[in-house]
Image: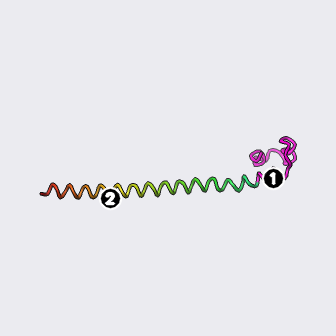
Amino acid sequence: MALEALKGEQTMAQLSARFGVHANMIAKWKREAIEGLAEVFADKRQKREKDTEAQIKELHAKIGQLTVERDFLSKAFER
């Protein structure tokens, strides 16, 4: 119902009659849906940023490991 209200194709009175729910309830759900949409997209952005940070940390750890291995092998071949 909130989605139908967001589309704006019908009035609140028409939606109320169609679904058998009071117009105030539909208006409340519409308002909550609008407020919730911002959170949905914000959560995705925050999750993506956390995933990126985790990947960067993993790559830095791998770089450190490879550097240590390279240094070890270069010293071993010098002997």
Quadrant (top left, top right, bottom left, bottom right) of the C terminus: bottom left
Write down the region rendered in magenta.
1-30
SS majority, magenta:
helix
Question: Residue 65 location in percent, x, y?
Answer: 31, 56
Query: 10 Å neighbourhood of mark 1: few (<14), some, or many (≥20)?
Result: some
Quadrant (top left, top right, bottom left, bottom right) of the N terminus: top right
Q: Is residue 4 magenta?
A: yes
Q: Residue at x 62, y 53 (%)?
A: 41
Question: Residue 32 location in percent, x, y?
Answer: 74, 54
Amino acid type, callout 2: Gly
Assign a secondary structure to mark 1.
helix
Amino acid type, callout 1: Ala
Question: Residue 77 location in percent, x, y?
Answer: 15, 54
Q: Residue furthest top?
A: 18
Among the 4 quarters of the image, the one containing residue 62: bottom left
Q: Which residue is mark 2?
A: 64
Assign a secondary structure to mark 2.
helix
Discs 2, 1 touching: Cβ within 8 Å = no
Q: Residue at x 87, y 43 (%)?
A: 17
Q: Is residue 68 magenta?
A: no
Q: Which residue is mark 1?
A: 27
Which of disc 1 and disc 2 is earlier in sequence? Answer: 1
